[in-house]
Amino acid sequence: MNLTNILIYILILSGFLFVVLLAVLKYIQRRNQQNGNAEIYKAYADYIGSGKSKRIKQYNQFLQESYHAYMRVPLLKQYILRIRKQLQSIHSYDEFSMRRETMKIVFATIGIVAAFILALLLMNKDMTFMFMIALTALVMNGMLIDTFVNRVENRLLHQLKSVMDDVRHSYQQHGMIEEALHDASEASGHEATLHARKVYEILVSSEPEKLLQNYYQAAPNRFLKAFAGISYLVKEFGDKVVEEGSLYLSNMNKLTNEINLELLKRTRLGYMLKGLTVISIAPILFTKPIELWAKNNFPIMEQFYDSKFGFFFKILIFAVILLSYVLLKKLQDQQEGTYQAKVRKILWEQKLLEIRVTEWIVNRFMPQKRTTARFRMHTLIKDANAGIPLEWHYLHRLLLAIALFVTMLFSFITMHSITIHNILQAPTQSATMFGELSAEDLQKARETTALDTHILQQLEGISPEMMQDRIMELVNENEDIAANSSLFLTTVERIEAKMSTLQSEYFKWYELVIAIIAGYIGYQIPWWILLFQKRVRYIDMQNEVDQFHTIIAMLSEIDRISVDIILEWMERFSTIFREPLHKAVLDFESGAERALEQLKQDAPFVPLSRTIDKLILSVERIPIREAFDDLENERNYNFEKRKQDYERMIETKSEWGRIIGFAPMTVLTFIYLVLPFIYMSFEQMSAYYEQLNKL
């Protein structure tokens, strides 16, 4: 059979297989139509291919298939679910979009971190350096995830602004909120379309209040919550004409101004702090090149970098890098509600406290019941919205204290071990050596170390009074050294110095004190974090009160509105003050003023207390509209005050960001390069003076 016939048979077989596969495809499509799955497959096909090029279609399909495949891998599954959880609120109503955005972030973060680790591993395979690489990779991973998620959030805010402009335009045409939302959802960007469509579905549903409550829990920012709440109020109670025109359009205009202010704040803050995180992490790349350069050009520097001081400075530099990253992350954090309590499935604290010994130890550190210290700590946890019991807080403090204490002990023991190893194993170099050691000089240095180690091993158990005589006896056994008096004295002095160093390398009392101080600092860190969270949470509390004012401004214009209805709406739109508001709603029937007074005590926030005072006046004394007649002026004042606060905050954060961002590079340059040169220069000068004195 010749080649032509073979090709003909292959062509016929290929054509036959093509027809068979086409028939199978048609059969599957027909069966899907009969089973009701045709719309799902069509939606998927439209999503990855409609209006897109072939490359984009293949790329989207690859992301969807990768998501399905990687979810079967245990470790990758947890990583994907972690990123998906952060994007859940933005893409919660479009599974294809959520999977696509999730896999984009997964591939980007894994690719960048893997390339970073590979590049560093090619530079050096030292265990300490590899440990630093591993921790740095974790830091970079968190940084990249936050960067990509913040980018999606910023895109959503820009699109939300466009959606609200479309809603305003359509509402002015039709005068119907449902039609305005429907038209806007068809004209806006993808992420904002999902939320506009969801608000529209809430308004036209048979159970709008229930769906609104669910959406309010899932909305990614306060602007979408306010947008949904204002739209629902207009649908429920109708619009009203006030001095500024339509009440709905007036509040939409104020909400748009809030979005513009938030976008300006994010843009300016992002510009001021741009690249500082990378600058703070970058010194980890230069530690090993600096060390190799110094060792190759100044061999005596190897003694410093391989000593316990070199190890200590490595740990110090990495600690500064890690601390700088954490502080910069706090400065760059623009997410609202960051410090709300998180629900976890695995409560490891509860399992630890079930152990009697652990519970007994924790109780010993906790303040006694019915004491001022215990009440203050309870109040701090509540104000910081930590959402954890008091026992868990002290468990965290004890565990962190123990971790830092053990880490410091291990570091000191490691430093002593490094010094002992260098004395017994490292090549012994002269202080006057410059440039790279030749093979012959390196061999002589190793032979010198072997001789010194052999003698040092024979000095164990010798009393200090007999030490010098015994060293001279052992050195004198070497005929080559004994024949040269100058070499003999140099060798004896060198071995005496090594023996003195070995005898001083033990765990000292002040190292224990330093470890205890480090443990105490670790014990205080969770408390400091609570104080920081309490301060940052003030902004979220003020934003929520401003949102209450928006709702009250609309409800106060409605005839026959009552205080209990306003309280119910405040509870629906609350997040931080939900618990005290819920309690006030339940207790309102048994006594309105008493319930409101209790609300002031349960939520001791001054702006909210002023609002509650006006509600108390509205119970029986004056109408609600008169009680809140100055609400518009107060809202305008708070808006202007927030603008000034944002400007001061941006300036403060930018100044601290530059200091913190460049701190690791400064520490690396001074501590790891300049300071070793100064130290070794003094060592060499001392060696030269000793040699000159011997002439």
Image (tube, rainbow, N blue to C red):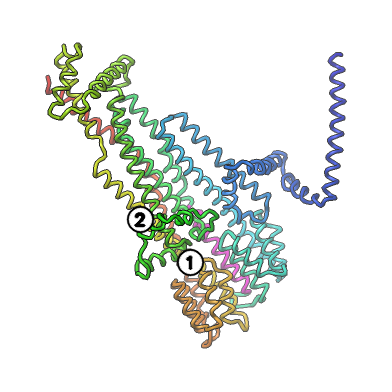
Q: Secondary structure at mark 1?
A: helix
Q: Say the numbered circle drawn on residue 690.
A: none
Q: Nearer the viewer, mark 1 or mark 2?
A: 2
Q: Residue furthest front?
A: 356
- Image x and y of residue 445, in percent: 28, 19
Residue ID at (87%, 30%):
16
Above or below: residue 465 compared with residue 134: above
Residue ID at (53%, 73%):
581
Q: Secondary structure at mark 2?
A: helix
Residue at the disc numbered 2: 524
Q: Which of 605/418 is in front? A: 418
* Residue 176 in the figure: left or right of residue 664: right
Separation (CA) of disc 1 from disc 2: 26 Å
Residue 249 included in the magenta stretch of the image:
yes
Q: Say the numbered circle drawn on residue 541.
A: 1
- Image x and y of residue 383, in percent: 44, 66
Q: Which residues are magenta?
A: 246-269
